Image (tube, rainbow, N blue to C red):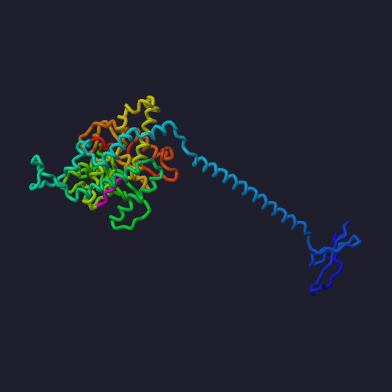
Amino acid sequence: MRKLVGAGETQDGSTAYVFVIRKSKTHVFSWPFVAASITRSTADFAAPMKRSVRPLFSILLLIAFAVILTCRVAIRRRFTQIELESKVLLETATPTVFNSTLLKMAAIDVGEAKSKQEIEQLLEGNLASRGRYRTFASWRKFNNHDSRSSSSRGIQVMLRSPEFYRQWLEFRRVLRDWARNKRYQAEIMMELVRQVKHPIDRHNGLVGSDSKYASCAVVGNSGILLNKEYGSLIDSHEVVIRLNNARTERFERNVGAKTSISFVNSNILHLCARREGCFCHPYGGNVPIVMYICQPVHLLDYTVCNSSHKAPLLITDARLDVLCSRIVKYYSLKRLVEEVGEPLEKWGSAHDGAMFHYSSGMQAVMLALGVCEKVSIFGFGKLASTKHHYHTNQKAELRLHDYEAEYAFYHDLVKNPLAVPFISDKFKIPPVEKSWKTHIYQQIQPCSSVE
C-alpha cells in the first residue's frame, strides 16, 4: 500500500513527491533521487517512482543472462570450429609415409661410376672410346690440311683452327659445371623459373618475371592423339611444350600447331649437329630448345650448336636430371614389388640396370611443374590399335623406360601430389590435368638410341 503524503522542492528547484509505503523495512526513496536511501526508525517509506523498480531489474537481469548465454554458445562454437579446423589442417599436413627401402634403392645410381670415368676421360681430351661421338676432333670446320707441310712419311699435316681450341675450352667449362651439379637437391624445382623462364622471357623481349606461366600443355607423341581432335584445346594454353621434334604438319587438328618450347634429349641435337649450321628447328628458328643430357659427350654438340642458335638453347640442370631419375626409379621399384610381385633384386635385370632411364616426356612434365601454374598432359597413353608415335610407324616399346611406372607418377600428380617422393615440401605442385582414359605409357625418343 502506498500513500501520497506531500510535495516539496528539491535543491535544483524541481518538485519532489513523497509516497509512504508500509513495509517492515525502513527505507525511504525520494524522487528524483531514486538511488538515494534514508533510514528511518518508522515503518513508513518514501517511494521514488510511480511503479516498483523490480520489473526493471528483472528485465536487466534477463538481458544479462541472455547475453552471457549467447556469448557462451558463441565461444563454444568458435572453439569447436577452431578444433575442427586444426584437425583438418593436421590431417592435410600429415606427410605421406614412404617406403624407406625403396627410397634408399631409388637413390642409388647404378651408372654413376661409369659416368664419372667418362667425364674424366673427356676432360683429359680422350675421345677415342666415344665411338661415333669422337668425330668432334676431326670436324672439317675445325681443321684444314696444309699442303706445304708434311710429316716424315709424307702425310699432310692437319692444322686445327683457333675456333677448335675456343670450342674445346668452352666444352670443358660446360662439362665441369654440369658434372659439378650432378647431385640430388630437392629444392631444384624452385629454381626452374630463373633457369628456364627468365632467359626465354628475355629472348621474347620481356622483363624476366618470377611469376609462372598461367597454363602449359605438355604434348606427348603417342598414337592415341590420332583418335582425338585436341588441337584447339592444346593451342589455347599460354605455353605448349613439344617433345623431340615431333612434327605437327598435317596433324594440327589432333595435336595443334603452336609450339612455345621444344623439349629434346641430347640424341636429337647430336643428329642436328651433323647438319649445316646445326639446324634443329622444325618449329621455327625462334622457338627455344630445352635439352637434357643423355651422355656427357653430347655436351660437345651443345657447345658447337649453341653459338648458331638464335633462340635460347638451354640444358636442364643436372640436379633436375638426378631428381627425375630418383622419382621414376622409386615408382619402378614400387611397381615391381606391389604389382608384378617380384623381389627388388630382379629390378636390374628387368630394366637393363645402368641403361634404365626416365623418358623425355617425364622430364618435360617436371619442367612444366616448375614453370607453370597449371599443367595439362596430352598424348601420354597407348592403345593396342594405335601406333607408338602419331607421326611415325614405330610400334615397339623400349625396355630402358618403365612406362607404367611413369604412369603411376602422372596419376599421383593428378590425384595425390603428396605421394610423389623426393620433391621438397617447400615446393607446391600445381594442378595437373590429364587427357587419357586408358593405360598410359610415355612415347618418346630414348636416350640410348636415335630413331
Left or right of 36? Residue 109 is: left
Q: Nearer the viewer, residue 233 or 376?
A: 376
Query: From this viewpoint, which residue is outermost toward the bottom?
Result: 13
Q: Nearer the viewer, residue 151 or 94?
A: 151
Tell me which residue sits at (24%, 37%) in the image: 389
Q: Nearer the viewer, residue 170 or 261?
A: 170
Q: Nearer the viewer, residue 111 or 126?
A: 126
Quadrant containing the C terminus in the rendered view: top left
Query: From this viewpoint, which residue is outermost toward the front?
Result: 152
Q: Position of residue 424 (x, y in %)?
A: 43, 43
Left or right of 374? Residue 243 is: left
Does the segment drawn in magenta span residue 206? Answer: no
Quadrant containing the N terminus in the rendered view: bottom right
Q: Is residue 107 visible?
A: yes
Q: Position of residue 131 (x, y in %)?
A: 20, 36
Query: From this viewpoint, which residue is outermost toward the top?
Result: 342
Tell me which residue sits at (8%, 47%) in the image: 147
Q: Position of residue 361 (x, y in %)?
A: 30, 40
* Rendered position, 342 above or below 166: above
Q: Position of residue 127 (x, y in %)?
A: 22, 39
Q: Is residue 451 visible?
A: no
Number of marks drawn:
0
Q: Which residues are magenta?
A: 311-315
Looking at the magenta stretch, what is its main secondary structure? strand
Tell me which residue sits at (71%, 53%) in the image: 62
